[in-house]
Amino acid sequence: MTHLHLRQVSKRFGAVQAVIDATLEVQAGEFVSLLGPSGSGKTTTLMMIAGFEEPSTGSIELAGRQVHHVPPNRRDIGMVFQNYALFPHLSIAANIAFPLKVRGRSRAETEAAVQGALALVGLQEMAARRPAQLSGGQQQRVALARALVYQPKLLLLDEPLSALDKNLREQMQIELRRIHRQVGITTLYVTHDQSEAMTLSDRIVVFNRGRIEQVGAPLEVYARPASRFAASFIGDSNILDGVVGTAANQLRLPDGTLLHAARPLLPNPGGGASLLVRPEDMHLGPPPSGADALTLQVLSVLNMGPHLLLIGQHGGRELRIRAPVSATALASEGSTVTAWWLPEKAWPIPPP
Amino acid sequence: MRRGVPTWLLLLPAVAYLLLVFGVPLGNTFWMSISEPTLGLQNFASILTDPLYARVYLRTVLVAATVTLLCLGLGYPLAHYMARRSGVVAALLLGACGLCFWISYLVRTYAWTVILGNRGPVTALARWLGVEPPPVLLFTTTASLIAMTHILLPYMVLTLYVVLARIDANLIRAAHGMGASHWQSFSRVVLPLSLPAVVSGCLLVFIFCVGFYVTPTLLGSPRDMMISSLIANEIETLLDFGSASALAMVLLAAVLVLLTVYDRLVGIDRILR
Amino acid sequence: MRRPEAPSLANALFAWCVVGFILAPLAIIVPMSFSASTSFEFPPVHYWLGHYRTYFSSEGWLLPTLNSFVIGIASSVLTLLVAPPAAFAVNRREFAGRRALQVMLLTPMLVPSIIMAISYYSVFGQLGLNQTYAGIILAHGCVSIPVVLIALSASLRNLDRNLERAAAICGATSAQALRLVTLPLLRPAFILAGFFAFIHSFDEATISLFISGREVSTLPKRMFASIHLEADPVVAVVSALMIYAAILAMAIATFLRQRRPA
């Protein structure tokens, strides 16, 4: 069932088009990430869903109700802000009780709900403290508890982990995942961190320059990016540009090498076309039959711990290969190696 | 998304208040300047042609300029020193300047009547040094210059300090690193960067000084009147509302010109930041 | 840390001399107030508390003091009713003519008091407001508007917009957000602003000299008369009391500023 529905939503600030024709359907209970670099329109989209910005055109529907003209306090949405935005003058318990207080709930009901929310985020013993006395991760949990305590129809998270250090961030990702499963609330998560989006989401919405470029499950977006931007923004990528050969799935590189794609290429009117091959899909050594291969001049070999990252060059283009540590024997800086991959791992993307 | 109380309604109380309690009295004074005792510009004609008045204007400008220069001369080194010291010393000095904002200028004026009076410490010192007769300071222009400098100095110091303290110490290190002497790094780096604050502080002090009334009246010589005292005098002793109003309008015009310059160079709304 | 451009000795000496110049008059007042002499003599020959006794038993001093308190409190309350909405508008809203309006709201502070003094003198004379509390309160409230505006602006600008957004998304109406979040967070700023407005009124002399009469004479007016005409040593007591109050006020203000949530 579609829970949140954006129909051709656009937002213009003066001469700037912040969001262009965003259309998106989110199912009840889904965890969806809005992923993109800063200025890509993801935050503006979130602000329009929350009600802090009004769409210039288009409509937003939440749980069967048109909400784009409804003020934020009557949308019944929970939100966690980038800087948590906890009320500094109120205790943790009073912060969490705030949404219930303004809704005029009874004292007993409020008390029980606050206890429940504190238990959910594991901060029962912090109830009497002030926000300033808590660590960043704890403040994060309080913000989450405050956003969930009134059982809103939708949870919005605006880069909630960006202020935390790396270890805490990973811990909070697990925590977010657990809470989402436990509560089952439909969640929109804004982030510019692709790995965060990959780990957490059921689906990822890729934003670029105000437009939605792709919507899909994390692995699908990773393996079958719909645009050059999606290909390069998510994960490491090797993009090979050339022209269409004799067959629709055949790419001819400028030096004449012929490569094959998993499906027909997406040529522009001039015949230009491109392929994406992920670094982990490229292998070193003699290519088996049916594989495509390139000879590379090795520029550098970086030991990344569990694997090697080999940076090589072919026809002026830099390529990256993720190889097992055992491949050290095959490649050293300055040597020439053959890299191969199976055509089904070569995904056509639009040419530049 | 804009909602809640409309902006005009938020502004209404303050704007209405100022129109009624600030605009109307000023408008009335303007009206009096051209209608007392008869309609016409004769008040302006007389105050702008009378050499007696011209001397008062000139004196006011000279006094204000002297006070401004004194404030700059005393204030800049202090602000510079404060900005280059960190921690307790700077906080202490800043507190000393800040304290003055909390103490009535009347109290400070009174203190100078004691210090400069004929039974005060300055006279005692002069006597002790053998200066006979000791210099008469109270009820002279010198006395009001000293007191006005004292009262306005904190404005200058704080205006300068805010900007000087913000100058990146690394810039000065860099200047030294490139071989600049202390004087060169000051004149080529610090001084140009602080020039806007110098202009701002000087204009502020000058504007306040031009309209000063209480201090010159209590400390200055009755013969060396400034424009404020002249205005008061026209009303209190001569009951000449027309001349007083016209003088007030001339002073207002001068201050508005200065404020416009200030606004162009610094921006009056910057006071809010 | 010693900075490489540490000030020279000459600079330091000069700076401390200037600070001495700034503080000397204040340092002189306090011993003066304990002087046994009946005129402005420094250093005093004998010390006693007699002038304090005179001050605290003289109606001629206590009444103006009371008047100044009444007028100061009333005008700061009046200003706190009128100015904060404008401070909100000027700092939080975008509208045509915002800059011009800011300048307009600040001018009462920048126009010389003597101009306002004679303006009130003639207008209030026609309205029967001269020598009344109402007249002085209205006049002081006018100059306090920019004072309150300045005192509130910094806090309004520094207030995290996300806190109000958080209140709204939690379901608070704009009135609830104002009452439960914005105003409590701005409370120290409001106290400070009211304090500044009070001090401003309490210290104001020029306008009071013209429009306050015998009945509602303010403390500065009384002091002015004393310094000007009679050389009454009780002025030293009043001045000393005002210095004690200023030091206390500054301590409180510093405390409030440090408590203000970032």
Image (spheres, rainbow, N blue to C red):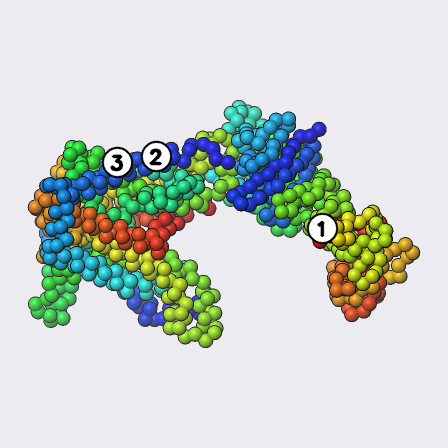
Q: Name the chain under label 3.
A: B
- On the rendered structure, is B28 left or right of A289? left
Image coords of residue A212 (percent x, y): 66, 42
Image coords of residue A300 (percent x, y): 75, 66
- Of badges 1 and 3, the one in the foreground is 1
Pointer 2 residue: B12
Any part of residue C132 in sight: no
Pointer 1 residue: A228
Work out whether mark 2 precedes mark 3 in sequence or the reverse, and give the earlier one: 2
Pointer 3 residue: B20
Q: Depth check: give the residue in front, C132 or A101.
A: C132
The answer to which quarter of the image holds residue A323 is: bottom right
Q: Name the chain under label 2.
A: B
* Tag of residue A37: none
Q: Which amino acid type is marked by label 2? A: Leu
Any part of residue A236 in sight: yes
The answer to which quarter of the image holds residue A201 is: top right
Report the label total.
3
Q: Residues within 10 Å of mark 2 (few under 14, many from 20)?
A: some
